[in-house]
Amino acid sequence: MTFTSPVPTTAGTTTGTPTGPTTGPTTGPAVLDADFYGFQDLLTPREQEAVLAVREFMEREVRPLADDYWERAECPVHLFKPFAELGTVGAAWPECAPFESSAVFRGWIGMELARVDSSFCTFVGVSSGLAMSAIGLGGSPEQRAQWLPPMASGDVIGAFGLTEPLSGSDTAKGLRTTATRHGDTWTLHGAKRWIGNATFADVVVVWAKDTDDDQVKGFLVRKGTPGFTATKIERKQSLRIVQNADIVLDGVEVAEADRLQRIDRFRDVAQVLRVTRDGVSWQALGTMVGAYEAAVAYTRQREQFGHPIASYQLIQDKLATAYANVTASFAMCVRVAQLQDAGTQRDAHAAMAKSFVTTRMRETVALCREACGGNGITLDTGVARYFADAEAVYTFEGTRDMNNLIVGREITGHAAFV
Ligand code: FAD
């Protein structure tokens, strides 16, 4: 099976004629032009095959509809199940994985999704990353057996409710949603904000403070539970396809059996966030790859002063900077994934990658937009969607500030959050 990127990134000569592929040292089946240093060599043949299947799905099913859905701020929920049937949604969990895989592979899949549409990556990632990781890491064996297989098959879609109207960066200490136990039942009161997928999810992982010990606990709130309402946040200008919601929890009753049994305090939640933060770094990488590919394609065909603009030094400077950002970010994502597999990854490793890669992403999408001139701000040129979506990716899973404070704490030994 071979696959050629729909947007070759071959450099033009002064006359605009491609001079040959600028791919990395390898020529394997899953070659991606933006993979300049050939990181695909780290994937097994089975993983490369799965990457190809995902790339083909994204090109066939998602790319053709992404701009329209983005403009209408609607989510192609119907694609979740066919995507899940490719077998990568539960790849991290032995009970649902079709084959054993590396963290590099799982991150790479997220990159492939974001390369075509960063919203689709978020839509899938909220369920397969945030919600499944919360259950996989925080659930009892029975809870894992109950929830992970149907989530991996796409029959159940999850959401993850941590952020609140009055608590974003300070969720470690500032959660106001409460959970009170009465026998075998808990009652939840409070509000959540920005919760992706919550308007249609079958299960929402809700984080709340136990009124007894003041520690954060996790609860599986099923669709239709009385007292739970989710209202879509309108007029969003980034990741418009993702359905984010304001949630109200007004006396929501949850059985003790639906409390995540291995979550006792916020430190346990942080473990989940470390893994999912790695996923957002890969998402940021994919977002800049998508913008970069579109900018290369546009600048090679757009002529000014009688020549393709790609033949001018200042345009090449922008493309070379974007390419270097992609390549450096790739290296960081790969290494952080390897640390995850080795079991040696610390919070600061994930935080540094998230901060660095999303910052490089922001610069990259701006350079790519700039290289496309005025047309770069229309969806038609293929850069504007990435440009707008980058802002949300830069912000969620900890802003740059918060992630740098995590790294700063590791450097200095001083926590400077407050
Ligand atoms: P704030 O915490 O209010 O921060 C505002 C600014 O102040 C930032 O620049 C921040 O860096 C800065 N700041 C805050 N504290 C400090 C400090 N001590 N020192 C220096 N600067 C500081 N959450 C979920 O739980 N589930 C989801 O599914 C989800 N999806 C999301 C999807 C989108 C599109 C978006 C935009 C957000 C989503 N979030 C979700 C929430 C996201 O994680 C938060 O937006 C993020 O953590 C930042 O919180 P905040 O927006 O409340 O900003």
Image: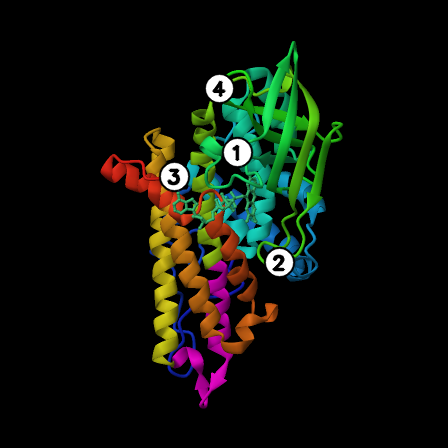
The percent position of residue 8, horizontal first and vertical second, equals: 47, 66
The quadrant of the image that shows the C terminus is top left
Q: Nearer the viewer, mark 3 or mark 4?
A: 4
Q: Do callouts 2 and 4 mark residues in contact (Cβ within 8 Å)?
A: no
Q: Secondary structure at mark 4?
A: loop
The percent position of residue 15, horizontal first and vertical second, equals: 41, 83
Q: Do callouts 3 and 4 mark residues in contact (Cβ within 8 Å)?
A: no
For residue 311, which quarter of the picture? Answer: bottom left
In front of the other: 7 or 77: 77
Precedes in sequence: disc 1 or disc 2: 2
Q: Which mark is residue 63?
A: 2
Label 4 CB-ligand 1 distance < 8 A: no
The percent position of residue 47, horizontal first and vertical second, equals: 47, 40
In front of the other: 242 or 267: 267
Q: Nearer the viewer, mark 2 or mark 4?
A: 4
Q: Secondary structure at mark 2?
A: helix
Q: Do callouts 1 and 3 mark residues in contact (Cβ within 8 Å)?
A: no
Residue found at the far bottom of this picture: 306
Precedes in sequence: disc 2 or disc 3: 2
What is the number of callouts on the image?
Answer: 4
Would you say residue 29 is visible in this rendering?
no
Q: Which mark is residue 337?
A: 3
Q: Which mark is residue 264?
A: 4
Would you say residue 205 is visible in this rendering?
yes
Q: Relative to 30, is 207 above or below?
A: above
Residue at 29 percent of width and 42 percent of height:
408
- Graded by Cα atoms within 10 Å as few (under 14), some (14 to 19) or many (20 or more), the crowding at tag 1 reads many
Magenta stretch, residue numbers: 289-311
Which residue in the structure is indicated by mark 1?
91
Residue at 48 percent of width and 69 percent of height:
369
